[in-house]
Amino acid sequence: MADYRQRLYDAYVSTHMKTVGTPTAEGLARSAESYETIFRAHLPADRAASIADVGCGYGPLLHWLQQVGYKNSIWTLVSARCGLGEN
């Protein structure tokens, strides 16, 4: 059953990363609007809190978090096959 990871990575890359394209300022702004609605109420009041985004794609959530003051945030990708590496 060890190949389940490979199947997950392949599915992610083929269904998600190909549709993302090159990140743009407009795309980040659209994402920020959604994140504000979905996540803002769930964030800690302490903007120095540590936040990790695992499997972040090109990083729009981290971009938004840093824009709204959560500077102690990090990211990593689950698979180097996505072509973006690790932070």
Image (cartoon, helix red, strand yellow):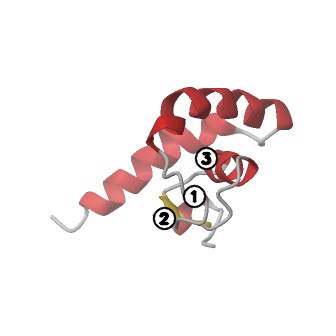
* Amino acid on which the number 1 mark rests in the picture: Cys
Quadrant location, the N terminus:
bottom left
Residue 7, percent across and down? 32, 53
Residue 79, percent across and down? 48, 64
Q: Nearer the viewer, residue 14 or 33?
A: 33
Instruction: Please tell me whether mark 2 or mark 3 is closer to you in this view.
Output: 3
Secondary structure of the residue carrying numbered label 3: helix
Q: Which mark is residue 61?
A: 3
Which corner quadrant of the image does residue 83 belong to? bottom right
Q: Which residue is mark 2?
A: 79
Q: Earlier in the sequence, mark 2 or mark 3?
A: 3
Secondary structure of the residue carrying numbered label 1: helix
Q: Which residue is mark 1?
A: 82
At label 1, counting other C-alpha atoms closer than 10 Å, the crowd grade (few under 14, some 14-19, many 20 or more) is some
Secondary structure of the residue carrying numbered label 2: loop
Q: Earlier in the sequence, mark 3 or mark 1?
A: 3
Quadrant location, the C terminus:
bottom right
State if disc 2 and disc 1 touch (CB < 8 Å). yes
Residue 46, percent across and down? 55, 58
Q: Nearer the viewer, residue 71 or 82?
A: 71
